[in-house]
Amino acid sequence: MPNTIIFTKEAPAPIGPYSQAVLAGNTLYVSGQIALDAETGELINENITEETHAVMKNLEAVLRAAKFSFSDVVKCTIFIQNMDQFGVINEAYGQYFKNNPPARETVEVSRLPKHVNVEISCVAVK
């Protein structure tokens, strides 16, 4: 079965040569999302809580476009620019995974696209 490229206008368009997500069999690989407003292209980064929620809403839009939800997510990767913000990011992120949270790693990096503070990718399985 060929892979299916997932695209939705409800999430920001890719800013490089990649897809928002790829469905391979029953597994969805969602590219890292940042806090870009899908309609305006503006960053939503007044504070780290708002930025994290915007990232999660973009992930949710891509998941929904592929007929998946956060309950299907089995793995996330969180890239953060400053590990001192881990607690605040974790608090916002946790609101989307109240029951049976997925496996995860969180990595501090020196720089992210558009100089954002947080980027999150995920893998979901049906």
Image (cartoon, rainbow, N blue to C red):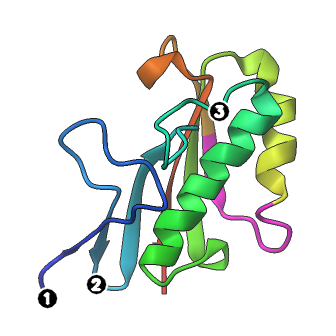
Q: Quadrant of residue 96?
A: bottom right
Q: Main secondary structure of the magenta part?
A: loop
Q: Is residue 46 left or right of residue 123?
A: right
Q: Residue 48, located in which quarter of the rendered image?
A: top right
- Give, as a three-letter code, the residue at label 2: Gly
* Amino acid type, label 3: Ile
What span is in magenta? 96-105
Q: Say whether residue 24 is left or right of residue 80.
A: left
With 49 as the anchor, is 26 left or right in this view? left
Vertical side of 96 occupied by 4: above or below = below
The question of residue 104 being in magenta is answered with yes
Crowd rating for badge 3 (residues with CA inside 10 Å; few <14, some 14–19, many 20+): some
Give the residue drawn at x 45%, y 45%.
Answer: 32
Task: State the CA–CA distance, disc 3 to disc 1.
Answer: 38 Å
Numbered badge on residue 25 = 2
Q: Nearer the viewer, residue 26 or 112?
A: 112
User: Label 3, label 2: how many angstroms apart (C-alpha)?
Assistant: 33 Å
What label sits on residue 1 in the rendered view? 1
Looking at the image, which is closer to me, 54 or 9? 9
At a point 68% along the width and 26% down the height, the residue shown is 45
Question: Considering depth in this image, is 37 or 97 the residue closer to the camera?
Answer: 37
Whole-percent x, y for residue 94 in the image:
82, 54
For mark 2, give the secondary structure. Answer: loop
Disc 3 marks which residue? 44
Cα distance in 3D space between marks 2 and 1 = 7 Å
Image x and y of residue 39, in percent: 49, 48
**Which residue is at a point 86% across and 32% down the rendered structure image?**
87
Is the residue under label 1 in contact with that under label 2 (CB below 8 Å)? yes
Residue under the image location 60 percent in, 77 percent down: 69
